[in-house]
């Protein structure tokens, strides 16, 4: 049995989407952010020491970290249909985009959120470092897509699901509209039936708007 500890407006939305794409049965335990702080509730610490989402329980094993969850489930479930096999020529690109999402792309987007809370005190850092880094990462991803909608060998994989939160975060605070290939790929993602089913399971997801 797979249990997804799902926090609203968080990375765990893509775990629900992944499981819907795989057709894997799962349960959802819902948690709500604090309306003032936007932090996860303390109940999540009872599941995982970091108190963050996504966290999944897989046959009693507790696993955190988006990239680890997505990679593990994609390889384990549905015959690995959303993974790329080790002997496949596209394997290196698959691993790159699977881990680029959190290893590189999300950091400047998160910095923009936090430094933005400083107001004018953060303007120099925002203009000199954060905004250029956001553009650097999004322009790279935009160019990699080209005329396609998928990051790996022009086929839908778990890497596209992992990258989806980057596109959602960029839509909220990173100027996604400047990167037409990313806009197009995001729209294609959201049109998938499994994506829509995941929204029904997870509840309101404003970042997807």
Image: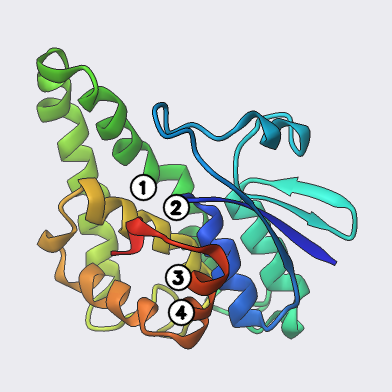
Residue under numbered circle 3: 160
Callout 4: helix, strand or loop? helix
Q: Which mark is residue 105?
A: 1
Q: Earlier in the sequence, mark 4 or mark 1?
A: 1
Sooner in the amino-acid sequence: mark 3 or mark 1: 1
Report if residue 12 is visible in the image.
yes
Residue depicted at 38% across the width and 77% down the height: 189
* Residue 79 screen position, x and y as percent: 75, 84
Q: Horizontal and vertical percent for residue 48? A: 74, 36
x, y (%) of residue 181? Answer: 21, 73
Which residue is nearer to you in this view: 132 or 31? 31
Q: Which label is found at residue 196?
A: 4
Residue 197 percent location from the top left of the image: 53, 79
Q: Mark 1, residues whose alpha carbon is within 10 Å: few (<14), some, or many (≥20)?
A: many
For disc 2, the marked residue is: 100
Q: CA distance from mark 3 to mark 2?
A: 11 Å
Q: Nearer the viewer, mark 2 or mark 4?
A: 4
| Residue drawn at the location 27% of the way across and 50% of the way down | 137
Q: CA distance from mark 1 to mark 2?
A: 6 Å
């Amino acid at each position: 049995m797979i249990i997804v500890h799902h926090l609203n407006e968080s990375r765990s939305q893509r775990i629900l989407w992944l499981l819907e794409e795989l057709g894997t049965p799962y349960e959802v335990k819902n948690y709500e952010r604090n309306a003032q702080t936007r932090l996860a509730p303390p109940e999540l610490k009872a599941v995982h020491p970091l108190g963050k989402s996504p966290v999944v329980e897989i046959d009693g094993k507790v696993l955190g970290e988006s990239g680890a969850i997505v990679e593990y489930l994609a390889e384990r479930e549905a015959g690995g249909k959303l993974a790329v096999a080790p002997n496949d020529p596209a394997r290196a690109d698959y691993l790159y985009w699977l881990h680029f999402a959190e290893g590189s792309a999300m950091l400047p987007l998160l910095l923009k959120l936090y430094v933005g809370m400083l107001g004018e005190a953060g303007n120099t850092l925002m203009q000199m470092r954060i905004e250029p880094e956001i553009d650097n990462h999004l322009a790279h991803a935009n160019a990699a897509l080209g005329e396609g909608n998928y990051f790996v060998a022009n086929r839908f994989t778990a890497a596209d699901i992992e990258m989806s939160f980057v596109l959602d975060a960029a839509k909220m605070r990173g100027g996604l509209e400047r990167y037409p290939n990313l806009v197009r790929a995001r729209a294609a993602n959201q049109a998938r039936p499994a994506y829509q089913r995941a929204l029904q399971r997870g509840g309101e997801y404003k970042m997807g708007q």
